[in-house]
Image (spheres, rainbow, N blue to C red):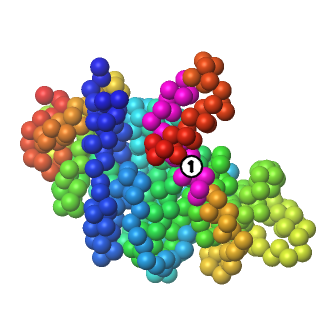
Amino acid sequence: MLPLATYINMRIVIAKPGLDGHDRGAKVVSRALRDGGHDVIYTGLRKTPEEIVRIVNDEDAEVLGLSTLSGAHNSLIPKICEQLVHNRLGNVIVFAGGIIPERDIEFLFRSGLRAVFGPGTPTSDVLDFLNEALIRKQNGDPVGVGDGSGWNWND
Amino acid sequence: MEIQLESETVRGGIGMTDISDLLESAKSGDRRSLSMLISAISKSGESPSINTSKGWVLGVTGPPGSGKSTLIGQMVRKWASSGERVAVLALDPTSPLSGGSLLADRIRMEGEDDLRENVFVRSIPSGKTPGAISPVLWPICGVLSECGWTRIIVETVGTGQSEFRIAALVDRLLLVDGPDRGDIIQAEKAGILELADVIAVNKSDLPGASSAAQHIRSSLSLASDDNREVVLVSAKEGHGIQELVEIIEKCEPQNTRGKMMMMERLISEWDSILVSHPEIDKITSELCDGSITVREAIEILVSSVRDGGS
């Protein structure tokens, strides 16, 4: 039997922070999540952290996926995570994808991320991650961006 | 079945008290509460009691690709910069196969930075009845109005029943078309042209727009008492937006809609009772293998609704 969470659809924002004009990856992931039964809101290109946080709030999303290929992840992602917590959105599950070197991942986890997906990741991995995150959330484990360190998908 | 029950407890569990608490705090201007309130209404179908209606709801309909989202973006900027608080509900289709949806309309609607406090955009998946107007839209528009959003814009998917049904939800209806697409003739056939309060021909920067507008005007002039306006606009260039907004502001909504609106609400509620019926899956399977007829299926559904089954 599939885990319970498979049957629950979530509202997910997929965002492109900063000056980065490539969104094929973001669109592939958005499509895969839709086909996995979720409601996906894609923000379009070049959003500031403030804009992304406002969209997550207004759409009342449970999950935020950040796609970055520009190399600015270490400055943009912590800023977004911080503002989410500041705006009472600390229970949002945040993950990232794109070009993010191995050595930066630990730092991003400390900012509140729960998964980082590199090039070549099968889209089913992202769905599996969301399933596991949701099961953990149901059990009261820390999975939100403001819940502090604990489980992450890549470990 | 067990799985569904589990997911209900996870998703639901929202009582009326939570909804009225959220409404109180949303009314005091808390945006987080407003956003959570809309989710709570969408999930539970409950509607809080609303006292007054301070603003009005504009429906925007028209064929896919006619530029509805971009035009809405322009109108939002005009209204927001003149001090109105504008909320946009963008309807998008839910995939009938996976139940998921991809909502990207807000890309074309974002306002400038300094207007953001006065603009609220929310994407709404069409849900289990694709093409129809979800019954939760009524209470959602109600709470937005109650929370001081003076201009509420509902954008349709652009195809299917929603084109027609949106008229039942809104106070004013704007029909958008492009130049020389011939779609307006289709709209005329479907009766949407009759329902619109204002008609905008978009993409006036392209050839053929003014002749399309002329075509519609001459079609309207066949009825001597029809004085509805046809406005040429270019959402891309920003031409004609001011005029369009002024016309929408002063247009007098058709008052013949009352009964039709109630009829559509009834149909929407009925549809949602039907698709959320606990035995709908079994009944459709039986229809597929021919063990019951459509008449018999209706008999089963109706009698269980009568017995308070759903």
Which residue occupies the foreground of this view, B218 or B304? B304
Q: Is residue B278 magenta?
A: yes
Q: Look at the picture and state if B58 lies above or below A148.
A: below
The secondary structure type at the circle numbered 1 is helix
Image side of residue B111 versus residue A88, left or right: right
| Residue A150 spot, x, y in % from top left | 9, 38
Residue at image position (67%, 66%) is B259
Circle 1 residue: B270
The residue furthest front is: B307
For the N terminus of chain B, the quadrant is top left
Q: Look at the picture and state if B218 lies above or below A52.
A: below
What is the span of residues highlighted in magenta in the rendered image? Answer: B265-285
Residue at image position (54%, 65%) is B153
The residue furthest left is: A149
Which residue occupies the foreground of this view, B219 or A102? B219
| Residue A91 spot, x, y in % from top left | 20, 50
Give, as a three-letter code, the residue at label 1. Trp
Image side of residue B64 versus residue B126, left or right: right
Magenta stretch prevailing secondary structure: helix
Chain label for disc 1: B
Residue at image position (30%, 30%) is B2
Q: Is residue B247 magenta?
A: no
Image side of residue A80 versus residue B125, left or right: left
